[in-house]
Image (cartoon, grey):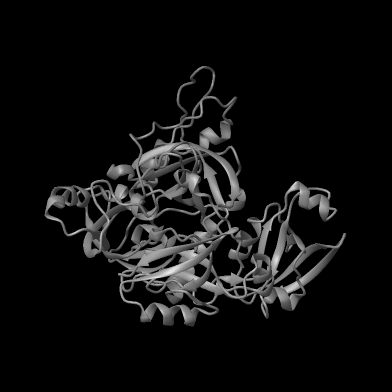
């Protein structure tokens, strides 16, 4: 199941960045929300035995007690890995290349993510591995050293070091990571460590005070505060996570750190920001604790994660579509295609159905569906309410496992999707008819060489080196026969373009 979202090139600067990707000009001040009309006395009391003095008739909460009690359970994480860098072999460029290699990892990561050359560095045919270093945050969840953090913090790590507030530095092992939810579990060998306590997503309310502890820009155990701006946010990054949106200041280095409520309970893992500049601009996102606990339990028990799949492609219902389908309001997930032989087809779902509820929970936007399915387990039976041809129907489906999407210890083997870095699936008949192609494969994810060349999620791969492709095996075979580069024929919307990709 996948809700495909395409972003035009003009919005690249507005992309969702992992909080460790790029920093702004400086660290934002702690947000105390003084514009709020009133702070509930119970909330202030829960934050600390004593509230701060009134400011302009409004009392702001004092988080010092929570910071003192649970701050020692928050750790700084340093990672060392390698990355392949392409540059020209030109003596005149020695100084420029040296400057590029000395660039802070966060900035280098930004340019790597968006496929452009780093300042002072030219693109060329020569590729070499260079060491990379990064930092993030995490928090201890068991006294014997189990730590939760973000998957992107430890992605590709060869060496992971955890620094405690008592200045001890311990080597950590990556037990497993799950890129789909951006949750990773690492472990250090220690005893009697301080731990956090968990809250419940169901108890978290919009407008409630929350605080983050982490290491923005390497400043360890920095505390920032704000409020919950929204719950259940779905983002165009294929993560299928119902994010918590806050206005807590989150910057590079906060990734993987805990989000606390005013009772000192962890309610989320700080993960992403939405920004026009790459730095914090008042919109931050955290992974709900319910999701994190589920992933942790699977990784600790089995070393891998299994996700459920329904087998549909859905799109948003706007007012025009709502009017066309005779819906009373523009909400739900419109089924555009159904996987042949998948759980949805076996349950009777059809293109044109509008999914309005799953197990009694409303589907308001199309992104609500993958987020809800992500919280289920393979084998679960779900009740699906659909709107079909002007009337409501209820169908029963049994979810299956997402194929080959289990978590892996990133330190043992980098997450690789072939030489191109593409995750592909064959087009369904309805999709081929829609784009007017007899063959092709849908790009479900683009990383590595393909992403750097400009291939995007949602593109359709039609041919490799002039040969039409219908299966993933055909793509692998064509790439294997190529030497230094391949030419991909890509369809994006109504346009077809050739994208040259240099092979590492």
Front one among 147 and 110: 110
Check the picture and name the quadrant holding the N terminus: bottom right
Residue visible at 55% across and 74% down in the picture: 425
Give percent across and percent down for residue 374: 58, 64
Check the picture and name the quadrant holding the C terminus: bottom left
Note whether residue 34 is visible: yes
Give percent across and percent down for residue 76: 30, 51
Give percent across and percent down for residue 502: 33, 67
Quadrant for residue 500, please give it. bottom left
Quadrant for residue 337, please give it. bottom right
Left or right of 313, for residue 194: left
Front one among 179 and 55: 179
Q: Is residue 22 above or below residue 238?
A: above
Q: Is residue 171 above or below residue 378?
A: above
Residue visible at 38% across and 59% down in the picture: 452
Give percent across and percent down for residue 427: 61, 73
Front one among 484 and 296: 484
């Amino acid at each position: 199941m996948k809700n495909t979202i395409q972003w035009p090139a003009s919005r690249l600067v507005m992309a969702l960045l992992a909080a460790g990707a790029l920093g702004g000009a400086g660290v934002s001040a702690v947000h105390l929300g003084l514009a709020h009309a009133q702070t509930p006395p119970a909330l202030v009391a829960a934050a600390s035995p004593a509230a701060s003095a009134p400011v302009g008739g409004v009392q702001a909460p004092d988080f010092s007690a929570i910071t003192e009690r649970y701050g020692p359970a928050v750790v700084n994480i340093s990672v060392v890995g390698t990355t392949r860098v392409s540059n020209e072999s030109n003596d005149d460029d020695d100084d420029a290349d040296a400057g590029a290699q000395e660039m802070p990892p966060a900035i280098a990561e930004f340019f790597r993510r968006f496929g452009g050359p780093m300042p002072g560095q030219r693109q060329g045919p020569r590729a070499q591995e260079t060491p990379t270093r990064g930092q993030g945050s995490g928090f201890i969840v068991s006294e014997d050293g189990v730590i939760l953090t973000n998957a992107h913090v430890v992605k590709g790590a060869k060496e992971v070091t955890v620094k405690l507030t008592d200045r001890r530095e311990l080597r950590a092992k990556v037990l497993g990571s799950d890129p789909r939810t951006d949750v990773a579990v690492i472990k250090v060998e220690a005893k009697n460590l301080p731990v956090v306590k968990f809250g419940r997503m169901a108890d978290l309310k919009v407008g409630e005070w929350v605080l983050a502890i982490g290491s923005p820009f390497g400043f360890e155990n920095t505390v920032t505060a704000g409020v919950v701006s929204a719950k259940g946010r779905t983002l165009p990054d294929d993560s299928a996570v119902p994010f918590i949106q806050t206005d807590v200041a989150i910057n590079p280095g906060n990734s993987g750190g805990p989000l606390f409520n005013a009772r000192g309970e962890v309610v989320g893992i700080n993960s992403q920001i939405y920004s026009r500049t790459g730095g914090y601009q008042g919109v931050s996102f955290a992974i709900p604790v319910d999701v994190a606990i589920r992933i942790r339990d699977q990784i600790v028990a089995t070393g891998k994660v299994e996700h459920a799949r329904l087998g549909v492609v859905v799109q948003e219902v706007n007012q025009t579509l709502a009017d066309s389908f005779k819906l009373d309001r523009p909400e739900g997930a419109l089924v555009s295609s159904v996987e042949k032989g998948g759980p949805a087809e076996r349950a009777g779902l059809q293109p044109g159905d509008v999914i309005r509820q799953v197990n009694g929970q409303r589907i308001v936007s199309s992104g609500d569906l993958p987020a809800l399915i992500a919280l289920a387990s393979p084998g679960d039976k779900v009740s699906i309410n659909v709107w079909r041809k002007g009337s409501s129907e209820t169908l029963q489906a049994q979810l299956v496992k997402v194929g080959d999407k289990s978590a892996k210890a990133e330190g043992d083997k980098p997450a690789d999707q072939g030489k191109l870095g593409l995750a592909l699936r064959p087009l369904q008949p309805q999709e081929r008819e829609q784009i007017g192609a007899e063959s092709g494969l849908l790009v479900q994810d683009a990383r590595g060489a393909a992403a750097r060349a400009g291939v995007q999620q949602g593109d359709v791969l039609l041919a490799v080196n002039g040969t039409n492709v219908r299966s993933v095996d055909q793509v692998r075979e064509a790439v294997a026969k190529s030497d230094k580069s391949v030419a991909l024929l890509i369809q994006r919307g109504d346009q077809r373009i050739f994208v040259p990709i240099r092979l590492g």
